[in-house]
Image (spheres, rainbow, N blue to C red):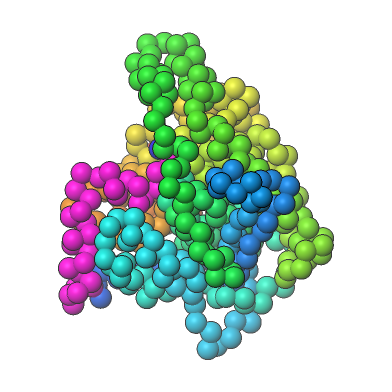
Amino acid sequence: MYKNFVTIILSAKHSGLLFVALLLVISSTAFAQTMPVVPKPTGKYSVGTQEFSLGDNSRGETLTDDADDKRELYIRVWYPAQNVSADAKPQPIFGSQTKELAEAIAASLRLPKGALSFLALVSSHSYADAPLAAAKDRFPVIVFSHGYYQGFAAQNADQMEELASHGYVVFTIGHTYETILNVFPDGRAVSAAEKPPLFQPNPKAGELTKSYMESKTPAERAAYARQIVLLSPANERLRVWVNDVQFVLDEIERMNAGKTKSIFAGKLDVKRIGVMGMSFGGATAGEVCLKDKRCRAGINMDGLQHGDVYASGLKRPFMFMNNETQNQGINRDIYEAAKSNAYFLTVKGAKHLNFSNFNLLSALDRESQILGKIPGDRMEKIMSSYILAFFDKYLKNIDSPMLERPSSDFPEIVFSAKR
């Protein structure tokens, strides 16, 4: 459940066929027809982007052997921009790290070093260090956490660009040693730990999950679910990731107050903050919104929810976006017991990987079937549309019929709402 697209690629039955086909396509004239295209943002603003690091000297780094190490995070931010130079070139799809990320992904798949180098040729719609747009009101803020271990800060860049074009400032976190790669601004490349904590064997958790799935009554299911979320090894790492997000929220407040140098002094509305994530990052978003009142609303994109949310219940507006296999289970139980406005969306034809920008490579995914049947460009539109509608409603007070009832524009969505 916490695996992002690369780890699932590795476990896919026919995963090798995808990349054999991909290498053949790269060397053929057909490549021009299958080159990914990043959807153009629909908002009125151009999109600027910056990257930097944040060090938290109050916390030691637990995933290294150096007792003196402190927690350090890679941050990528997208924001509304203006006066972009006419000769400015947009960054590659995953920003300045695209080349290194392509190599890291290829290495993890035991592919030739340059097998995915074509990603550096795929343009985004983001411009490095573009001037921040002027606006009468301050911009609301979104914080995003990626999928576990082989996810990365820019893995949903398309959604970040869409939000920024509509007037949001979006901070994404590279959770160091649990992301495939962070390339810090000083050039240091920090890859994932060799033995990620969440991937260690846990027979007890497996037994509990089996019992949960076989439960005959709601009471039995609730009892097993409670044990799963309390005993899972995910909880220790979840606390670290929640602390990461809260630290970034602290730094966002410092930037807005002018205590940390940035272009955002006085421009961020820290009373309107949303938190979202994909996979384990989605579980992080749910836990942050439970524990930190600065979170006004949150989204979990296809992540099994752990932490205290199951026992305590949702208390702030929240949206679950799910693939078809998660239509029932712990997330559904949490939604049904929500104490706040809540939404439960199931995307027909989607698999776990479809909740990242791996959709942009769907034209190459013919044999492996690691992606669902839903077309990649369609899935990107679904994610961007519902994420924007949700945050517009709860951070900007802009209502949308998409959050009132099933939408005829999106028949792929099985829609439920509690208000």
Residue 218 falls in image quadrant: top left
Above-or-below relation of 155 to 323:
below
Above-or-below relation of 65 to 357:
above
Looking at the rendered structure, the number of numbered marks drawn on it comes to 0
Residue 19 falls in image quadrant: bottom left
| Residue 330 horizontal/vertical position (percent) | 46, 26
What are the residue bounds of the magenta stretch? 2-31
| Residue 4 horizontal/vertical position (percent) | 40, 48
Q: Nearer the viewer, residue 334 or 209?
A: 209
Relative side of 365 to 220, left or right: left
| Residue 349, visible in the rendered structure | yes
User: In the image, is residue 203 part of the stretch drawn in magenta?
Assistant: no
Q: Quadrant of the C terminus?
A: top right
| Residue 128 horizontal/vertical position (percent) | 57, 75
Q: Residue at x 63, y 62 (%)?
A: 53
Relative side of 202 to 281, left or right: left
Q: Residue at x 44, y 55 (%)?
A: 180
Q: Nearer the viewer, residue 137 or 286?
A: 286
Q: Quadrant of the N terminus?
A: top left
Q: Residue at x 56, y 37 (%)?
A: 238
| Residue 54 horizontal/vertical position (percent) | 66, 58
User: In the image, is residue 11 part of the stretch drawn in magenta?
Assistant: yes
Above-or-below relation of 113 to 109:
below
Q: Residue at x 29, y 49 (%)?
A: 9
Relative side of 96 to 116, left or right: right
Relative side of 78 to 295, left or right: left
